[in-house]
Image (cartoon, rainbow, N blue to C red):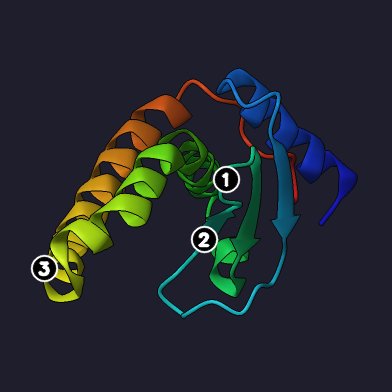
Amino acid sequence: MSEDFLKWVGKLAARMGLRDWDITIIANADLPDSCLARCRIALGRKAAEIMLGAEFDKESAEGKRATMVHELLHCHFSRADEVVDETLPDLLGDPVYKTFYTGFNLAMEVSIDAVAVEWAKSMPLPPEGE
């Protein structure tokens, strides 16, 4: 991961209102083949790890940009996920919660992706050769 790439991610994060977040990039993370990237957010903190799978490097510049915007958007939506995950299991019980969370998670992913695809168009592309 080059310094230029990390600066580009920082620029995206700043433009997306995440200036006060600690964003760590992990290249060549062990992710399922169908997964380009994954964002892991520290509970109650403004800190995230964005793990990039091997398939990320094969994406076009536009694809990399959209994927990174998508993963950064998870930072904004993470608080909703925390509220659901920290309160509903006890209220609903495990079987009902698991059913609810499957739908909730899918809805979040689809919504985040829809916003990411459009917002990414206004963001800079990654550095040449990245």
Q: Amino acid at mark 3?
A: Val
Residue 130 vs residue 30, the one in the foreground:
30
- Left or right of 42: which side holds 6? right
Indicate which label's residue lies in the foreground, 2 or 3: 3
**In the figure, 113 relative to 94: above or below?**
above
**In the figure, 25 relative to 97: above or below?**
above
Who's the residue at 49% across and 48% down the image? 67
Q: Which of the two discs, 2 and 3, labels the residue nearer the N terminus?
A: 2
Who's the residue at 26% across and 62% down the image? 89
Observer able to see residue 112: yes
**Residue 77: percent from the left, percent from the top?**
40, 37
Q: Which of the two discs, 1 and 3, labels the residue nearer the N terminus?
A: 1
Q: Secondary structure at mark 3?
A: helix
The residue that disc 1 covers is 61
* Residue at mark 1 to residue at mark 3: CA–CA distance: 41 Å
Who's the residue at 48% across and 20% down the image? 122
User: Which mark is on residue 38?
Assistant: 2
Q: Amino acid at mark 1?
A: Ala
* Residue at mark 2 to residue at mark 3: CA–CA distance: 26 Å
**Residue 51: percent from the left, percent from the top?**
62, 62
* Residue at mark 2 to residue at mark 1: CA–CA distance: 18 Å
Residue 6 vs residue 78, the one in the foreground:
78
User: Which mark is on residue 5?
Assistant: none
**Residue 43: percent from the left, percent from the top?**
56, 50
**Residue 88: percent from the left, percent from the top?**
24, 55
Q: Which of the two discs, 2 and 1, labels the residue nearer the N terminus?
A: 2
Q: Secondary structure at mark 1?
A: helix
Residue 27 vs residue 56, the one in the foreground:
27
